[in-house]
Every structure is written in C-alpha cells, then in structure tokens.
Amino acid sequence: MKIALAGPGAFGIKHLDGIRKIDGVEVVSIIGRDKEKNRQVAEKYGVAHTTTELEESLALPEVDAVILCTPTQMHAAQAIQCMRAGKHVEVEIPLADSWADAEEVLKVQRETGKVCMVGHTRRFNPSHQWLNKKLRAGELHIQQMDVQTYFFRRSNLNALGEPRSWTDHLLWHHAAHTVDLFQYQTGDEVIAANAVEGPIHPELGIAMDMSIQLKTRAGSICTLSLSFNNDGPLGTFFRYICDKGTYIARYDDLVNGREEPIDVSRVDVSMNGIELQDREFFAAIREGREPNASVASVLPCYKVLYDLEQQLEDAK
C-alpha cells in the first residue's frame, strides 16, 4: 500500500515512525510548506517524492491513501480533496473546527465510499483499550471520568518548540479527544454539556483555560479541565472512577487508584497508540470496511463541541 503524508511536523514524524513498523505499507510522498524540511524528512525516511502541493501528490496514480497532519483549519477541506481525488484518508484530530465542515466531510465520505478515519488516538492507546474491553464486557461501569489536559503554551509553538503557522484550540482540538473518548467508553450519548472559559489571549486570540462538564443518558459524568497556562507536568491524564475500582490512564500507562501498575503490554500488537491507529486505517482499506474512529463514528463528538462553542459565544 502506497501512502502520502501531508505535514511532516511533530505529529507527522510520529506517524512516519509508526509506519516503519507496519509491513506492506510504504510512504511514497511527503507534502509540506517548507521544501528543505521536506527534503530532510524524506531523506531520513527513504521517501522519493516531496512537494509543497497536496494536489501534486494526489495526482500520483500509485498513491492509495493520504495521512493529513496539517493545520487544523485545513483538515476538512483537505480530507474532502483527498476523497474526491479517489484516495482514502486519515485526518489527524480534529476532523474540523466547525460543525458544518464536519458534516460535509461525512457527506463526501458517503458519496465516494472511501475510507475516512479521524485520528482519535485515545481509542487505540493500550491503556484505554484495556478499560474498553472491561466496559464492553459489563465488568465495569463509569461513574465519572475526571480528565486534565495541560500544556504550557503561551506562544505559538508546536510540540517540538518550533513556530506554528496556525493557532491551536482547546475546544476543537484538545477537548475533542476527551469528548469522543467519553462517549466511546460509555457507549452512550452525551445529553448535557456545559463549558466556561478563561480570558482570551491578547495575541493568540484564544482562551487559555477552559472547563467542561458532560453527562450521558445513563448518568455517567465527565469533568474536563484544559489549560495552556499550566507550568508543570504536561499532557492529558484520565481518571476513570468506576463502580468497581478507579483507574488512571497516562498515555500508554495504566494504574489503579492506588497507583499500582496494570500490565497492558499484551492488549495489542504494539504499545504505540499512533502505530495502532495507523494499523487500523490500513486494515480497513484492505478489508473494505468502516474503521474504528471513522468519520461517521466520531461525528457525535463534533456536535457536542459545536454546542459548547455556541454556549461560550452566548456567554460573551
């Protein structure tokens, strides 16, 4: 299978590293704004073709699918462009930064029949997979998920400390992980959602702090705190408060409420959530099926984000 990767930045590199471990898949084209950076990444990963234009890669007949690791504001339009060019597409989170765009991506996916998967990596992390199996089997029920998503990002830099050409967003990007995971793990619909945000950054034009509350039809609740102001441990930490035990997931690590480690090394074929996500994308293409984290399955998350956005706008 021949793959084009758009956006060889911090997250694009994670995909390239993961794909190296997957048999039968080859990255044949890299698309990015910076020609020199494209060249350096292509040389490191043995990719023959580079370009600054997505359209050029889409015109390559050997390309079967595209992975989009581009700025948030480009995701929906580029996903649509890929599918209309006859390519399967995996678009990094978030699918879109508006409800209308998210709906349009699903519409085009249904029109073209192409695999369109969204990078909701938490569905694939072994820690969350371990819990998902217990939840699906009825061995556990979530009473509350308490989640902290914390960064120290008062300037427009990416995960590698490099300047960004776009602005990140706590609601449409980072909250999307938890809103989707909460509905996925409970297997239930969010029927109540509330949000408040802190002051808007004078230069970035975004809220630097946010608090979100969610409730499902069956009564499970989620409390999510997000910040770009946190000068301390960084990342997202999930506390699952269940009817039979408490569990804390930190990326691919899982402990119980007493901080005793739980072995998740045999949950899947890898401990790398990005690699597992990509494996699912390629398997869905080969098997002609809908993938886990398909655009259709994650769309309820984006409806909740839209409703929260409207609530925040009304509160101004």
Image (spheres, grey):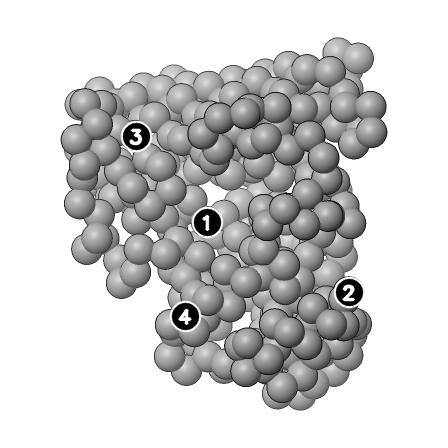
Q: Earlier in the sequence, mark 3 or mark 4?
A: 3
At a point 41% along the width and 62% down the height, the residue shown is 275
Give the amino acid type for the residue marked by disc 1 in the picture.
Answer: Thr
Residue 288 in percent (x, y) is at 46, 72
Which numbered circle lies on residue 248? 3
Give the amino acid type for the residue marked by disc 2 in the picture.
Answer: Arg
Q: Earlier in the sequence, mark 1 or mark 2?
A: 2
Which numbered circle lies on residue 121? 1
Q: Earlier in the sequence, mark 3 or mark 1?
A: 1
Q: Name the image quarter holding the C terminus.
A: top right
**Residue identifier under label 2:** 33
Give the amino acid type for the residue marked by disc 3 in the picture.
Answer: Ile
Disc 2 on helix, strand or loop?
loop
Residue 78, compared with residue 246, is above or below; it is below
Residue 66, compared with residue 102, is above or below; it is below
Residue 101 in percent (x, y) is at 74, 47
At a point 59% along the width and 80% down the height, the residue shown is 43
Q: Do the numbered discs 4 and 1 sit on residues whose CB atoms are within 8 Å?
A: no
Which circle, 4 or 1, is nearer the viewer? 1
Q: How many marks?
A: 4
Disc 1 on helix, strand or loop?
helix
